[in-house]
Image (cartoon, rainbow, N blue to C red):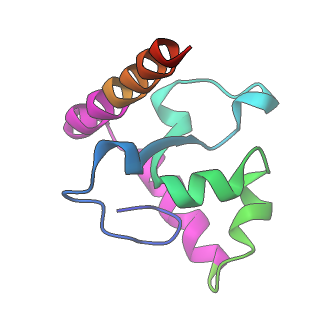
Amino acid sequence: MCLFCERDLHGVAPQELTLDHVVTRSNNGSNDPSNLFLACKSCNCRRRDRLLHDFCSEFENPGEVLHRIRMHCRRRLDRYRRSAKAILKSRSSEIVDTDNDL
C-alpha cells in the first residue's frame, strides 16, 4: 500500500513502486530502513524533495498520513525485501536501457 494515498500496490509493475525517504536525500536523509517507506510512483514524483509534513498537508487527513508513515518506519523491512529488490532491479534495467539508447 502506498503510505501517502493508500493505493493497493500488490501486483503492480515494479516500476510503479518506489522507496521514498522520510527525510529526503536532498536534505541529507539516509537510506537507512528507518528513513524509507513504500510509495507509489505518482505520489513520490509529486512530492519531489519537499518536506514530508508539507507534502502530507495536501491530503484530506494529513495527520493520518504522517502517522501511517511513522508507524511503518518503526517496522522491520524483512518482509518487504522482495519488493525492494524488484524496485532496485527495475531501476537498474531502466538505466541500462537508457544507456543503450545513447
Quarter-of-image position of residue 33: top left
On the rendered structure, is 53 left or right of 31?
right
Residue 82 is inside the magenta segment: yes
Task: Identify the residue at horizontal 56%, vertical 36% (top origin).
Answer: 35
Quarter-of-image position of residue 26: top right
Foreground pick, 99 / 7:
99
Residue 16 vertical placement versus 19 (above, below)? below
- Residue 78 in the image, given as x and y percentages of width and height: 23, 32
Tally of marks: 0
On the rendered structure, is 15 left or right of 30?
left
- Residue 13 in the image, given as x and y percentages of width and height: 28, 50
> What residue range appears in magenta?
62-87
- Residue 3 in the image, given as x and y percentages of width and height: 47, 62
Task: Identify the residue at horizontal 27%, vertical 32% (top origin).
Answer: 86
Residue 60 vertical placement versus 28 (above, below)? below
Provide the major secondary structure of the magenta segment. Answer: helix
